[in-house]
Amino acid sequence: MNDMSFAYQAVTLKRELVRPRSMLVDGRWVAAQSGETFPTYNPSTGEKLSELQSGDQQDINIAVAAARSAFEGPWRRVKAHERQKLLIRLAELVDRHFDELNLLDSLDMGAPVGVTSPIYKRRSVGRVLYAVSSALQIKGETIQSSLPGEILSYTVKEPIGVVGAIIPWNGPLGMAIWKVAPALAAGCTIVLKPAEEASLSTLRLGELIGEAGFPDGVVNIITGYGHTAGAALSAHPDVDKVAFTGSTEVGQAIIRASAGNLKRLTLELGGKSPNIVFPDANMEQAIPAAAMAGFANSGQACIAGSRLYVHRSIFEEFAQAVAAFGQGLKIGDSLDPDTRIGPLVSERQLERVTGYMRVGTEEGARAISGGARITEGDLAKGYFVPPTVFTGVSDSMRIAREEIFGPVISAMPFDTEEEVVQRANATPYGLSAGVWTKDISRALRMSRLIRAGSVWVNCYAAIDAAVPFGGYKMSGHGREGGMMHLDNYLETKAVWMKEE
Ligand code: NAP
Ligand code: MG
């Protein structure tokens, strides 16, 4: 797609978006029972994009009932190879309509199209295709038990049932697909609640799911707030499993809400990931990668490399180079193809991030780049903050401990390997980590000793549908990606057969 067509398509989309959006329940597009709606905004400009239905408990009840009857009814009889065919069609539709889906996210939550277009297509389509391949991999085993007599034992895998999926706003399309596709491959039905700040691409995905031919009620989409629609979905007694991506705090609320009927849970939660640079690293690669580990998606990434540990011998130089790299990134409207850093998603997120910038300074750290909202020129209308690097940070400061979810890197020097391992692990989170070194033994040691779900050596943020992704400690439960992902949507039944 060339530059002109981004702008052209965006104008067409904006015109289309003016109409109020409805929700997908049992194959029909409906309004909320309450008649309530809420607005969604373009964070690059602060302008309103569209009006969405404010679904609540009543709508969740209807959607869960639809998902239940689809599960007990026609969907249960759809064989794996038929689910595979439907998913292949969905993959084709996501591929064909990717630019539109991606533009919707850019408009709605501010990710720069120039960055996301080349990367997210492969990722989004790839996630559906992986589900296509996994649909036929569902299998049990025959097991030799030690019970006396002729008794055969084997396992079968069955779909868990009705899944409630709740996703955040920082990568809406990819996240919606990573919930829906494996659940469908497994034979589950779904009620999906996107984040109120960015629901548009999920609603469009719902239309494509219908076009692909999935039966009514198999996928339902309820827009609305977390404290109403989200809370109702996670507490619903007829939902068998909740797949959640979001903050650790809401993850804990979901664990509590799940207790009523002991829902199965997968939780992809927050992080405060260490990115560790040794003096023998390839600096040409490590500098831009360390910067983008912290600044990509304006730092609104669960895997953000927000704690940058650099060996003391190269600390000053490296921190300055990361700051300079950040200063060279073009900040702008998410639809400008040259933009590398878009806005934060909302005014609320802007307050959170600038609040942390103030706290950092008050606690004695020093911003060597960035450090405050952009208040001049065109960007003043949107929620823009520049890439920020803090030095003079100690491990006990809040900017070194808490997830900021903005383009803020806390750079800290270290002296020894043992020390940095201990400091890297001294966090309640355990989502991911980066290690930069050419020493293979050190790379092996570091990857063994760091307690995190993903460890990237001489790279950062590599994610693929075939590879498990998820958190240790308070970064979550379960894994998405790989065959474990599908298993999260399956129950295991042991069958015993005795010869008469
Ligand atoms: P959030 O506040 O936890 O919201 C996530 C979703 O949960 C939204 O749809 C939200 O609804 C909903 N929600 C809020 N309160 C709820 C409740 N009481 N019950 C049920 N659902 C509720 O997170 P966010 O601010 O959108 O996203 C940022 C967080 O997500 C960060 O902590 C980040 O690290 C994490 N994240 C993790 C991963 C991962 O894979 N590990 C990936 C991306 C993001 P509304 O927002 O519509 O009210
Ligand atoms: Mg929005």
Image: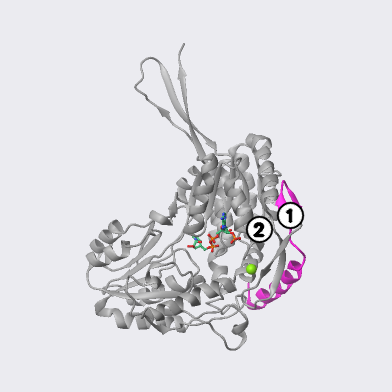
Compared to residue 18, the image places residue 154 above or below, namely: above
> Would you say residue 18 sits in the magenta stretch?
yes
Q: Which residue is mark 1?
A: 32
Q: Position of residue 299 (x, y in %)?
A: 48, 71
| Quarter of the figure with residue 471 | bottom left
Residue at 56% across, 52% down: 179
Q: Ligand 1 closer than 8 Å to the CB at disc 2?
A: yes
- Ligand 2's image quarter is bottom right
Mark count: 2
Q: Give residue 294's position: percent from left, percent from top.
A: 43, 72
Residue at the bottom extreme of this rendering: 377
What amino acid is at disc 1? Ala
Give the image location of residue 118, x and y in percent: 55, 68
Q: Is residue 126 above or below residue 389?
A: above
Magenta stretch? Answer: 1-30
Q: Is residue 71 above or below residue 104?
A: above
Quadrant where the N terminus is found in the figure? bottom right
Disc 2 is placed on an element classified as loop
Task: Name the residue at the top extreme.
Answer: 500
10 Å crowding of disc 1: few (<14), some (14-19), many (20+): many
Q: Residues within 10 Å of mark 2 (few under 14, many from 20)?
A: many
In front: 407, or 174?
407
* CB atoms of marks 1 and 2 within 8 Å: yes
Residue shown at the point (68%, 36%) measured from the top left: 74
Tell me the number on the disc at residue 224.
2
How is the structure coloured here? one colour
Q: Is residue 113 visible?
A: no
Which of the 4 image quarters holds residue 198? bottom right
Estimate the x, y position of residue 214 in percent, counting from the top left. 68, 45
- SS of the residue under disc 1: loop
Residue 114 inside the magenta-drawn segment: no
